[in-house]
Amino acid sequence: MRTPLALTVSGLVTAALFTVAPASQAADEVTHHEFQVNCSVTHRLPDDPIVFPNLPGASHEHSFTGNTTTNAHTTLDSLRDAGLGATSCLAPDDLSAYWFPTMFDGDEPVIPIGKQVIYYKSGVLDYTTVRPFPPGLRYVVGSPVASLDEFRTTPGRVEGWECGNSFFNWDFPTHCLEGSQLNIRYQAPSCWDGVHLDTADHKSHMAYPVNGSCPTSHPRPVPMLEFKIAFPADGDTSQVRLASGRGFSWHYDFFNAWDEPTLAALVSHCINGGLQCDPRGYDQYKPHRGAALGTNYRLPGRP
């Protein structure tokens, strides 16, 4: 008995649908929920506008990236007033300030070369609930007075200091393979109390997630920053130190001054959308999803 042509075609279409669907689903499988900010170090100062506002010279030395005007007198207004493009980051609408203690090898400063990576990720399991930072939010991650054990056990740790094939160093290793770099990855708390843009200790308004969710005291999920900084130090690193002390005194500061629509677009497209985005908000593994920003790293339609 001959099978009717219509049934044959129908069967082929059905088979095709069943073979194509899994591939399509695999292409949109969520493995990441992040975008990158790439910025270079612009200047060094013994200032900290969060911890020592309006007190130039009161801090140990920091290396500043992002907004090119950051100093002891920095405020949200001054960051915004710096104007479009007053940043070392690829996105000219990111006028935020990022800084960390300067590294020294003996008395010589060790400055990261080129663009460094700052990830904006979801720190909670439900990545669709993450919302942009409010304007002016600022905080300190880590502590310059931490002990080695505190640094080793903090929720923000990733792999400690690493160089070459040496990982999980909670203080600086005394030697790194020639041609390698001293790298640090360190994650920030990503739950905001929803009220305070800063607190007296510059930490209490932020908290790390607990079991993948924000605690009731800090119910607002915001992007989790992860600094990934590479310092050009290799060979004998026995004299390497931070301006704040030993390797376990690593910390960093963040002062949000993003253009609000730009940050909202990146958070929505990349974090809420479950993508692994570059600084344009483009996931090279899922090109069909498009990009949040244009080739000029600005929102579509902005010159």
Image (spheres, grey):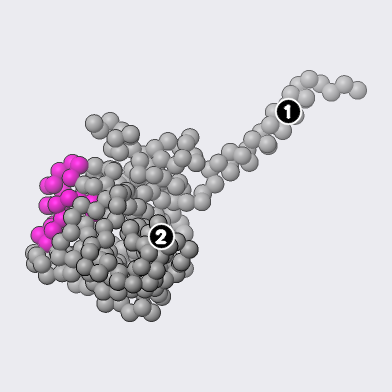
Q: Give residue 94's position: percent from left, percent from top.
A: 25, 47
Q: Is residue 147 left or right of residue 2?
A: left
Q: Position of residue 21 (x, y in %)?
A: 63, 38
**First along the sequence among labels 1 and 2:** 1
Segment tinted magenta in the rendering: 65-86
Q: Position of residue 10 (x, y in %)?
A: 73, 26
Give the quarter of the image for residue 73: bottom left
Q: Position of residue 108 (x, y in %)?
A: 22, 64
In the displayed image of the protein, which residue is found farthest to the right? 1
User: Which residue in the structure is indicated by mark 2?
Assistant: 178
Res. 34 in view:
yes
Query: What residue is drawn where x is 25% and y is 66%?
Result: 104
Crowding at mark 1 (Cα within 10 Å: few <14, some 14-19, many 20+):
few
Kindly identify the residue that appears in the image at 75 percent across and 29 percent down: 11
Count of numbered labels shown in the rendering: 2
Closer to the observer: label 1 or label 2?
2
- Residue at 12%, 70% (x, y): give it: 58
Is 83 covered by the magenta stretch? Answer: yes
Measure how far apart labels 1 and 2 are at the Cα level: 60 Å
